[in-house]
Amino acid sequence: MLQSLFDGILVGSILSLGAIGLTLIMHILRFANFSHAELISLGAYFTLTLDKTITALSSVLASKLPALSVSVSLIIAMLLALLITGIIAAIIDVLVFKRLRDNAGPLTMVFASFGIALIMRNVIGLVYGLKSTHYNSDIAFAMMISADPLLLVKADQLFILALTLVVMVALHLLITKTSLGFALLAISENPTLAQVNGINLAAMVRLAWLLGGALAAIAGVCYALNNQLSPVMGRDLVLSLFAAAIVGGIGSIYGAALGGLIVGLAGSLALVYIPTGYKPAIPFVIILLALYIRPNGLFGQER
Amino acid sequence: MIGVISYLAFFLTIALILAIAVLGLNLQWGFTGLFNGGIVAFFGAGAYGLVLLGGPERVDGFGGFGLPYPVALAGGIVLSGLLALLVGLATTRLRHDYLAIATFGVAIALESVVRNAEYLTGGAKGLRGFARPFESTVANPLAYNLLFLGVVVICLVAVYTFLETLVRSPFGRLLRAVRENERAARSLGKSPPTIRLTSFVLGAMIMGLSGGLYATFYAFISPQDLAPILTFQIWAMLIVGGSGNNRGAILGTLVVWGSWVGSGWLLTAAAPQEWQLYAGSIQYILIGCIIVLTLLARPRGLLPEKLTQMSYKTR
């Protein structure tokens, strides 16, 4: 039970990062982006390539941090990858979503996002192969924190928790302390009123994509550290991300963070009672419950 | 010659079975503007419903009631409708992309149930041994396949006629009214959520019919038949053909299914050995490109929706 709680919080914190970008775009551009989860795979795989490149260039950076399977080069690679992923997210918007936004309805964008997800996932499969892989092949040993109730924790997992916490705090500071954050919040609260006050909508949309892509990339690296890299990792996460965004309330950044934890915990605790095979169905049950009981989520406004 | 005819019959049977599902989607998306991201779930419910109700008795599981074929087929269709009702009741009152998320979810949930609930669905092995109607009376397999193709054509024509009548009826105008301007429809005292729900459930039942015919044709259904790619293929068929046009939907099915089968054949025949593993990925990218490029370059499809003379007069 304690182990399930820990695993739930760990997975939940990763989901939170992914869901924040999703909920922002869903709110500002009013469409459910089914290709958002593919940015998670993209970020994870970019990090893999960059990490290999940096390691090849400098062996000093390849040395592991104490107790972790994470190296300095992996962290540098992740920072670069989150930038690239954010830019790619913004480019996809310009190439596809923006054109559809100008000429057709939001549902056409939903539709196109399915197509883009399909293309991204399979291109990753073509480039990196269909087999799953790891950042490094060393076996990370788990520390026994407590024997009864059993709780096994890997140092990497503590690293993931610390990283997501740092990112969340940074995001909180961005939103509450900077004018850029105020502008983003204003656009997502009321686009028309925000524009009247001189906020550039196009720039804020770009910022939302950059931010969403970057957070997705971090989520991807964390997920890959905790599990493994595979071309279908995005597909496996997409429904959980939607569940987190809906439970939290579309458009609420704090809601998405909390929603991610709720979905992660629910998924992990449910497996105590039901067979593992049914795991993919759990986010659907959460979505259905949320829509029947509280369709605007915990922090969402009625629209 | 016999080989060509029998292959053509096989190709057309599958294509026209899928065309029925595309017509169901056309009712939802083309005429009502409802996004169904989990077509495969309603297709699968129809297929499993049929085999469970009409199949031979199972020693190790539920179902196999051996009901007469029409009753079993209708049962599968009703099952698809009930599944649509479960999802539709939760979402037709809400933001329109919630239906997309919920239907996408129901497909994933259904797939995990059919994979794991062995007692109910046979698990990964699927359900075998379905006795196809009249198969014992028609000895020649080719003759039987041609006969079956005839039945599929009759079903397709029936669904087509039903939908053409429906969209020309006052109810069809209501569907388009809800699609074009929900607020205006509400101001005339109509209830958009109810209209959307009706259209969604009807469309899902048509997909259930398609699934039922598919399971009949193969006399077998397994989770492999419910791969998520089916949803995207059916979407591509509709968007290529032209959503809002039933004839376009059928044309789009033939074009996209032809390219799918053709590209698969080409990859098997021409691609080097080490690329064979990735043939599926290449085909998936093809479907993705068809969807995105059609939306960008020719959003109204090959045969665009015809707005009838009536709708101009009444302006």
Image (tube, helix red, strand yellow):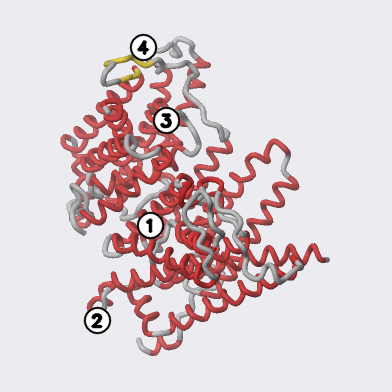
The reply to whether label 4 and label 3 mark residues of one chain is yes
Q: Chain of mark 1?
A: B
Residue at image position (30%, 60%) is: B91
**Mark 2: few/some/many CA within 10 Å (<14, 14-19, 20+):** few
**A95 in relation to A177, above or below:** below
Residue at x 59% of width, y 63% of height: B216
Is A71 drawn above or below residue B255 in the view shown? above
Q: Chain of mark 3?
A: A
What distance separates the C-alpha of mark 4 from that of mark 3? 24 Å
Q: Nearer the viewer, mark 1 or mark 3?
A: 1
Q: Could you tell me which secondary element the residue under label 2 belongs to?
A: loop
Query: In this rendering, would A265 be left or right of A299?
Result: right
Provide the secondary structure element on which disc 3 rests: helix
Q: Earlier in the sequence, mark 2 or mark 1?
A: 1
Residue B97 placed where, x, y %? 34, 58
- Residue pointed to by mark 3: A81
- Closest to the camera, between mark 2 and mark 4, is 4
Residue placed most toward the observer, B311 or B20: B20
User: Which disc number belongs to residue B188?
Assistant: 2
Give the residue drawn at x 71%, y 52%: B265
Q: Which residue is mark 1?
A: B100
Residue at x 24%, y 32% (from the top left corner): A168
